[in-house]
Amino acid sequence: MPKFLPTLARWSRLCVALAGIALLAGCDYNFWQMDGHQSTIVVDGPVAREQLKVFYVTVWVTSVIFVLVGGALAYATLKFRARNEAEEHAAPPEQSHGNPLVELSLIGASVLALVIIAVPTLRAIWYTYDIPEADKANAYEVTAVGYQWWFKFEYPAEQAAVDANSKTPLISANELVIPAGRPVQVHLRTVDVIHSFWVPKLAGKVDMIPNRANHLWLQADKPGYYWGQCAEYCGDSHAVMRFRVIALAPDEFNQWLEQQLQTARTVEASAADASRPKPQFAALRSFGQNEAGVTEQFDIAPLESWRAKQEPERNEDPALIARGRELFAAKTCNTCHTVRGHAAAGILGPDLTHVGSRSTIAGGLLENNREQLHRWISNPAAVKPGNKMGKAYVDNRITMTPEEETAIVAYLESLK
Ligand code: CUA
């Protein structure tokens, strides 16, 4: 066999692999647009934009360095290569060292490169650390709290009545709803380990550290639906500790607040309510399956899908929902979850008062629909390894028949 054949085979394999990658990338619209759900290149807010500027300045400066150094290297390699047998074995040419002009200009160029990067970096640090003075009066405040593995969101400005006498800040989970076009101050807390709050299209990461009051601010240019992710390794299910940010126009935001401040919706077993229109799930037309078999049904029109979730389902079964409400207490779900107005005040898990109006469940991992609710409550440990609900099922010997599960799912869906 000719000697060059194995080499040729190796190169062919490499070429085929590269062509495959190029083909895959070429088919992926998002790859070329660089506009995935968690893109830091196509951004929608002033904080992320400022951070993007630093990225670009750094890329340009380092590109120039790369071209100059790479060019010099290529030039020297080609120009001074050995052209024949004699040159290959020739003694090396006379070496020189200590050229003040070359050395000083290299030092000067390095300092210049650092200054070019440092100025916008410092400016960005300054700008992103705190809301600009002029905008402070217009800012909206929220608190984000990291739990293993979900996010709690508190709205200190909105006071929700727990009972006739006591009020607490409005509390939600996994979906942070904010007013678009206004700066939002996010106080960052954690109840257990270190987490990190990251909404790539709106603002870069800031850690949530035990016993430390961190904060960040962000702003969405326009109404939209944004993907967020815990960005600090925090245990078994860190990778699926997700959340969403939903930015709404002022009117819609106020409407949402009003709805959230209500106590839980109570569907009476006798009251059939079939008059409401069925919401249109435009986004359900197409969805992919990610590596864990999780549906991503919000790809097409996530904000519209989220809006549709705010409307009660039309074909709900009042008797089934009432049964689910009883079971929610009977199965001790209420010891970990709050449902304001339904005698459930647990604080270990997410507040479920309006869980039916969220687009996701299980820490932003699953879409909030009947199929996924079943999947989640029937075996939480399988969906999200290590989570407390799965452990509570085992510790407290909580089991559910398929009928009971259906009733509880109907109840959760009714909590709009
Ligand atoms: Cu929380 Cu990673």
Image (cartoon, rainbow, N blue to C red):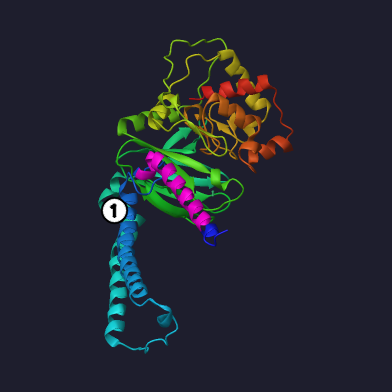
Residue under pointer 1: 132
Q: Give percent across and percent down for residue 325.
A: 60, 22
Q: Secondary structure at mark 1?
A: loop
- Using the image, determine if residue 235 lies above or below residue 247: below
For the record, the magenta segment spans 8-32
Front one among 171 and 252: 252
Residue 277 shown in magenta: no
> What's the magenta bit mostly, secondary-structure-wise?
helix
Q: In screen coordinates, is 397 left or right of 257? A: right
Residue 141 horizontal side relative to residue 346, left or right: left
Percent position of residue 306, x then y: 42, 29
Horizontally, residue 204 falls left or right of residue 120, namely right
The answer to whether one can see residue 254 in this image is: yes
- Which residue is drawn at the image coordinates 47% and 10% (left, top)? 274
Residue at left offset 34%, top offset 50%? 48
Please name whichever residue, 2 or 245, is drawn nearer the observer in this view of the structure: 2
| Residue at the front extreme of this rendering | 1
Residue at 30 percent of width and 38 percent of height:
222
Is 12 covered by the magenta stretch? yes
Q: Which quadrant of the rendered structure holds the N terminus?
A: bottom right
Quarter of the rendering containing residue 30: top left
**Residue 283, x across and y down, in percent:** 42, 27
10 Å crowding of disc 1: few (<14), some (14-19), many (20+): few
- Name the kind of residue labelled 1 in the image: Pro
